[in-house]
């Protein structure tokens, strides 16, 4: 495992995140179509426990009455126990402060202004004596703490908790947005360090390709039944009752220029109408190559499963970095599985 988590909220829903009161916003976004907005709310991402990792996210301070105080932004936790957190201290000019509860702290010197998107990166290493927490702002090292980062017996963190609480009065909340999230661990020899800048966009189906095995919910082009963002549930859909049937769709041109494309993945919303333990896999088809299938994802009887395909760092046809022309020629779709 290397890249632990990627999220840009481009599907305009929070399926796959059961512990959240923050809201999708199409107003506060760093890239693509959406970000996540906080006002007296929270968002939790559970992960396989790690002792060391690199986090990246875009941050936008919306502001509001009563926000000129210290406010916690993100905790790294073991279950409900905080091992450390980052706050933005608006009592001292909006500087980032690293806090290891009951142990120590370190404050940065780059002010985080209102109504500006910043790229925040955090390196976390949990250790009794050789621990480190370092924060970069727009690629520049800002706050750094070293020493004891293990305030109790926990040696790893297994969730990230973004929060926004009251600043002391009714309606006086710390308001902010996040977007373009990535988390790396330190294993695998790739995606094992600082992430740097990155932006996540969605590319939707815009045409039917040659393979159309699935049954459409209406007598129209299949792709028109699966191109909604957010997904519209049982309003429009394609379905199959035989294992290993699939639909393949053309995808909208990405519109990118002068970029480095570091990864792609497919994502969908699906359910098992018979609630029989059936699965679905998402596939991609690069021009000149063979289909690449993601793992089988077992479905439930409601649209509450976040179906992800294989994350691909290079074009499987030539094992070289993805280019814009590759993405514009890419096809993909769902396959029914046992």
Image (cartoon, rainbow, N blue to C red):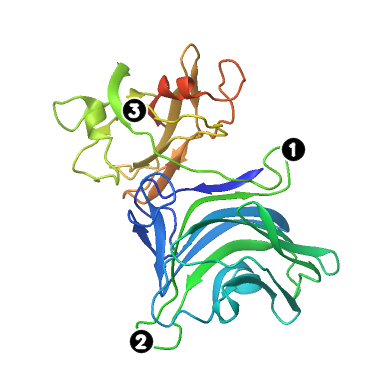
- Which label number is shown at residue 170? 2
Check disc 3 and report the residue beneath it.
252
Picture coordinates of residue 295 (x, y %)? 51, 34
Picture coordinates of residue 313 (x, y %)? 59, 31
Q: Residue at x 55, y 59 (%)?
A: 46
Badge 2 density bin: few <14, some 14–19, many ≥20, Cα 10 Å: few
**Marked residue nearer the N-terminal end (2 or 1):** 2
Please tell me whether mark 1 or mark 3 is closer to you in this view.
3
> In the image, is 338 to the left or to the right of 55?
left
Q: Picture quarter containing residue 270?
A: top left
Check disc 1 and report the residue beneath it.
189
Q: Residue at x 59, y 62 (%)?
A: 159
Q: Residue at x 47, y 60 (%)?
A: 116
Picture coordinates of residue 291 (x, y %)? 47, 19
Give the spatial CA distance, label 1 vs label 3.
Answer: 33 Å
> Please, is residue 211 above or below residue 252 in the view?
above
**Quarter of the figure with the N terminus:** top right
> In the image, is 114 to the left or to the right of 131?
left
> Please, is residue 147 above or below residue 178 in the view?
below
Depth order, front residue of 169/268: 169
């Amino acid at each position: 495992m290397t890249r632990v988590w990627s999220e840009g909220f481009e599907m305009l829903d929070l399926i796959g995140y059961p512990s959240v009161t923050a809201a999708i916003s199409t107003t506060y976004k760093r890239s693509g179509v959406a970000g996540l907005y906080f006002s007296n709310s929270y968002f939790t991402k559970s992960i396989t426990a790690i002792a060391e990792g690199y986090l990246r996210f875009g941050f936008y301070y919306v502001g509001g009455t009563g926000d000129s105080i210290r406010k916690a932004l993100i905790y790294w936790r073991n279950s409900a126990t905080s091992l450390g957190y980052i706050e933005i201290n608006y009592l001292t000019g909006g500087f980032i402060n690293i806090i290891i509860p009951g142990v120590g702290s370190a404050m940065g010197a780059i002010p985080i202004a209102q109504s500006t998107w910043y790229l925040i990166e955090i390196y976390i290493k949990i250790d009794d004596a050789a621990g480190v927490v370092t924060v970069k702002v727009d690629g520049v090292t800002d706050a750094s703490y070293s020493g004891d980062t293990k305030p109790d017996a926990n040696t790893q963190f297994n969730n990230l908790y973004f929060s926004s609480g009251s600043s002391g009065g009714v309606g006086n909340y710390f308001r902010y947005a996040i977007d373009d999230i990535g988390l790396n661990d330190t294993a695998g020899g790739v995606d094992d360090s600082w992430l740097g800048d990155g932006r996540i966009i969605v590319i939707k189906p815009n045409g039917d390709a040659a393979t159309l095995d699935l049954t459409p919910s209406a007598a129209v082009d299949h792709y028109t039944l699966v191109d909604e963002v957010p997904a519209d549930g049982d309003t429009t859909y394609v379905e199959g009752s035989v294992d290993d049937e699939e639909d393949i769709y053309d995808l909208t041109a990405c519109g990118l220029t002068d970029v480095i494309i570091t990864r792609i993945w497919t994502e969908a919303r699906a359910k098992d109408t018979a609630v029989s333990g059936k699965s679905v896999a998402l596939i991609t088809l690069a021009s000149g190559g063979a289909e690449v299938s993601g793992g089988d994802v077992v479905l439930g009887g409601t649209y509450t499963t976040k179906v992800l395909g294989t994350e691909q760092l290079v074009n499987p046809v030539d094992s070289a970095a993805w280019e814009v022309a590759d993405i514009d020629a890419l096809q993909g779709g769902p396959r029914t599985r046992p």
